Amino acid sequence: MASFTERMAFVLVMALCLSGALAVDRGNFKTCDQSAFCKRQRALKPGESPYRALLETMELTNTRLTLQLINDNNKVRLLLELYRLQGNITRVKINELKPLKPRFEVPDVLVREPPTEPLSLLSQDENGVVLSLGAESQRVIVSARPFRLDIMEGRDVLMSLNSRGLLAFEHLRMRKDTQADSEAEKKEEVDPANPAETTKDEDDKDEDGMWEETFKSHTDGKPNGPSAISLDFSLPGVEHVYGIPEHAETLRLKTTDNGDPYRLYNLDVFQYELFNPMALYGAVPVMLAHNSQRTTGIFWLNAAETWVDISSNTAGKTVFGKMLDYVQGSSETPQTDVRWISESGIIDVFIMLGPTPKDVFSQYASLTGTQSFPPLSSLAYHQCRWNYNDQEDVKLVDAGFDEHDIPYDFIWLDIEHTDGKRYFTWDPHKFATPKEMLQGIMDKKRKMVAIVDPHIKVDSNYKIHNEIRSRGFYIKNKDGGDYEGWCWPGSAGYPDFTCADMRSWWASMFAYDQYGGSMENLYTWNDMNEPSVFNGPEVTMHKDAMHGAWEHRDVHNLYGFYVQMATAEGLIQRSGGVERPFVLTRAFFAGSQRYGAVWTGDNAAEWDHLKISIPMCLSLGLVGISFCGADVGGFFKSPSSELLVRWYQTGAYQPFFRAHAHLDTPRREPWLFGPENTALIREAVRQRYTLLPYWYLQFYQAHCTGQPVMRPLWVEYPQDPATFAIDDEFLIGTDLLVHPVTEEGARGVTAYLPGKNEVWFDVNTFQKHNGAQNLYIPVTMSSIPVFQRGGSIIPRKLRVRRSSTCMEHDPYTLFVALNPQRTAEGELYIDDGHTFNYEKKEFIHRKLFFANNILSSINLAPDAKFSTQSWIERVIILGASKPSKVTLQTADGQESQLEFEFDSSMSVLTLRKPGMNAGEDWKVMLQ
């Protein structure tokens, strides 16, 4: 019998779930006006800044410039640090010169202390200083009164800081009612060179929310008082900005003048609304700005609640209005202004100066790392719901995929698999023999994911809880006791993942002798790690909870990042450092790409939610997180068969491909919607499996370079303004363009095919289309409009089996798409698919190219050692001419004639059974 608290937890949870199933309760979440620091900062209007630079305090070393700033209104001094970093990045840090106590600086997100390059002084006078940033006449101008920082290249201003005078830095102070008691003590500490501490000023203004703030029934005591920071950035020549996920929003960010700013504050939002700036589960404080000349980026390294305002001098102008400006010779340069506001911490901003999109991706990767290289199987199809009932249910679902000839690699278990929501355990009745279950799916070369959430049931009979409590690893409340909140188990404690010792202990719990019933084919899902606290303010943790010396307000957006970090480390350690982990997280921050995959959370079975999955994943890819997907079919509600089919067709071409559904929805395994729809879903899933070699290559390249896997068209066609706002189609790598069908009842879609000199081949019909055009494509229910770029070579495996591992040694088919204006190129990457041995050069990496009627494979990694049983069983050349003969030359110089077929109506040449090993040198010559 469930205890009273467990029953109450269930009632509360179901109430939340049912209300969420209808629509998000916006009243549970703050607007800017309800967030005291945001309201306070947003009340500041553009104008002359009170801050000036004290040039006499400037110190310039080989690696950095330091300079004091003073607020002339209150005489508080700040310390500006400016660094020129390797790779065309400028770092600007601003902190109090002498804070009352240390202010939080984000650790662990940067992969290393960024290496610097020399700064040199070009000129200096009483108005400011000019510093060289090295190459291409780039320089920084620091203006003294008011303080302003401009980054220039030649005569062009690339970016300005504080040009609108919105720099604000709420210094730490004593509360007025305690100030008198310590006045004598303060006088003893006063620095004559820094009289700020004796100045009576705006400190006397005790505005609402500075020292205490109430939202609904929750009061946030603020022992440190107001501590917000703000800085504005101006981007001349820019009309398009992107990034700052996670929001259910278009790819191109909108201006916020007439509404709330975009909010970055990790929250558990049931069935979120679309097209608004409300915060969601993750926060990456990175924005990209793009025009046809340049791409730049801003990385605001702060983990506190953050709001981002965007305004533009061209916002709201009609096309006619812009044309009128042109005709009348208007000289107004388009400009976007961005303002960042955070509740606490310091200003620590990295300005990535491009100039190309790929440069910005490399620059950001140099700071926070690249996407982890996932196991190949995790790029295949995942089957999930809340919840598969028991081991027999798992067995039947697994058998259903085989019966209906649909491949899958992972089956997932949600919270009901545990013993009373105690993570690292199994329900003793429903999952009594988990190893037997895991062995059963392992025998079919398949795997399982089980959920492990970071809220821990308060139960003295629960080993995990007892260990965390005895070691003092729980987050504390403001009074020093263990913080407790309400979540799925009822009363729960929250481990302090900001503590390295706690993370190490957590990782050790994934060892096979600690996590009973686990095996090597069991992987992990971290949900609810915003953290979600059902009875907390905004369904999350109180900001005055304590992580050691720091308040939760300082670290909030880091919590999910640390949970995934510790979990991924646990999966690595359990294998002795051999096996790559797979960990899915709902909450994330900058750098989360290093630890696994994310998904877009609790979406709904609605057409608009299908559409929004594209820009949401594109936005994540732009800020380093490539391994993104959305719940296929929608988590809440029940999809029509048409919506479900279209969602499978879309999800098959997104990086993380998982179907998932809410506890209260009818079952929706792919074969439950009639044989016609089963066949359509089967075909979509099979297309995913044939393309796994290409997906795996894209993730290898993302891991090596930081380039996104799923990318907006403008990334590859940065000078084509027609691509800048497109978010209903996308590229996978450089060579596949996908325009999913996301409209109900659609009979056609219009796809933009970019590139004036490009040609694009329909991958289904092999029909050729020229670039730089809008192409209308008639569609049926079986249509997934996908195009291969002319000038590319894409490897596929056409023998689809029950799982990706079953296809390991199968042969490849090479699809060579020709463009008469360029050489066709591609790559093939092969390793064991699951270990870190690729770091020891155990892989095959081949360059494939077609030029002068010769198709060749050469070794891109001659020092690497790996062998494969796979061979090339077919080559299909699109846009070809008919040869008189085809000759294969292998690495040993042997030559043989190959059979071929030529379809003159489509100009398609097929070479059958060439038979060369995929890891060796060879040439195929057309004559």
Image (cartoon, rainbow, N blue to C red):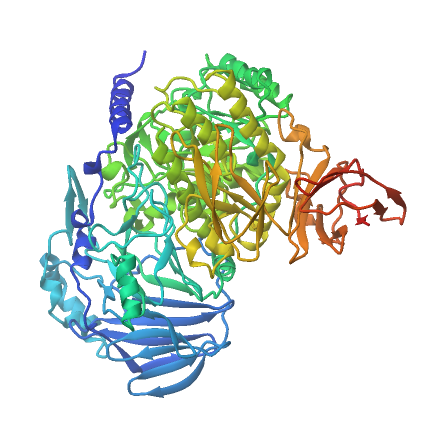
The answer to which of 72 and 714 lies nearer the viewer is 714
| As drawn, 569 above or below 114 | above
Q: Is residue 195 left or right of residue 807?
A: left
In which quarter of the view is residue 822 placed?
bottom right
Q: Viewed as shown, does residue 665 lie left or right of 833?
A: left
Count of picture labels: 0
Give the percent coordinates (x, y) of residue 865: 76, 47
The x and y percentages for residue 699 are 57, 45
Give me the residue at 69% from left, 33% from top. 808
| Location of residue 288 (image quadrant) | bottom left
Which one is nearer the viewer's eye here, 577 or 606?
A: 606
Left or right: residue 68 versus residue 775 is left
Can you give x and y, in whole percent of width and height, for residue 451 in the image?
Answer: 45, 29
- Residue 230, quarter of the rendered image: bottom left
Q: Residue at x 27, y 55 (%)?
A: 255
Q: Is residue 51 left or right of residue 421?
A: left
- The answer to whether residue 804 is visible is yes
**Residue positioned most to the front:** 905
Image: 19 above or below 185: above
The answer to whether residue 96 shows anywhere in this view is no
x and y, in percent, of residue 775 in the image: 48, 45
| Closer to us: 16 or 218 | 16
Frontmost residue, 915 versus 521: 915
